[in-house]
Amino acid sequence: MKKFTNTKAVALKYKAYEDLAPKVIAKGKGEIAKKIIEKAKKYDVPLFQNEEMANMLLNVDVGEEIPTKMYETVIEVFIWLYKLEEKAQLSK
């Protein structure tokens, strides 16, 4: 059985017109990260892999907004996700 000792995961949530900034809704390392990833896959939540970003987001408490210094980086990820969803809709 593969160990997930170095695995890290952070889940973000953002609702336009409702939230001021994206919030961390789950985070963890090892087995907890594995469960976050499994749940995302179960509900078809797209996964984005960036170790540096994950390390920075692991310092944000669950329920807290991401720091302003991370806005630009996270916006790039959300744009990527939006385009991915657009392509998925067009292929239906």
Image (tube, rainbow, N blue to C red):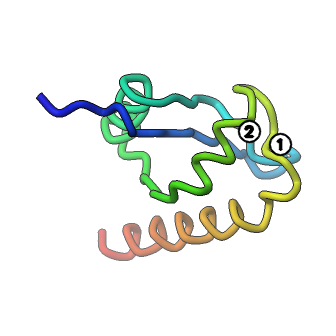
Residue 40 at x, y = what percent? 40, 38
Q: Total number of numbered labels?
A: 2
Q: Are marks 1 and 2 in contact (CB under 8 Å)?
A: yes
Checking the image for residue 27, the label placed there is none
Using the image, determine if residue 64 lies above or below residue 86.
above
Q: Which residue is mark 2?
A: 23
Q: Is residue 61 above or below residue 13?
A: above
Instruction: Look at the image and tell me in which quarter the N terminus lies.
Output: top left
Q: Residue at x 71, y 36 (%)?
A: 59
Amino acid type of the residue tagged 2 in the rendering: Lys
Question: What percent of the width, then of the height, locates residue 24?
Answer: 68, 36
Task: Locate residue 14, reporting x and y percent.
Answer: 71, 46
Horizontally, residue 33 falls left or right of residue 64, namely left
Query: Which residue is located at x 30 percent, y 68 percent?
Result: 92
- Amino acid type of the residue tagged 1 in the rendering: Asp
Q: Residues within 10 Å of mark 2 (few under 14, many from 20)?
A: many
Kindly identify the residue that appears in the image at 43 percent across and 52 percent down.
47
Q: Secondary structure at mark 1?
A: loop
**Dot 2: what SS?**
strand
Give the image location of residue 53, x and y in percent: 62, 55
Q: Residue 19, which numbered label?
A: 1
Q: Residue furthest left?
A: 1
Q: Is residue 47 left or right of residue 14?
A: left
Please name whichever residue, 90 or 34, is drawn nearer the observer in this view of the structure: 34
Q: Nearer the viewer, residue 86 or 24?
A: 24
Q: Nearer the viewer, mark 1 or mark 2?
A: 2
Q: Judge left or right: residue 11 versus residue 65.
A: left
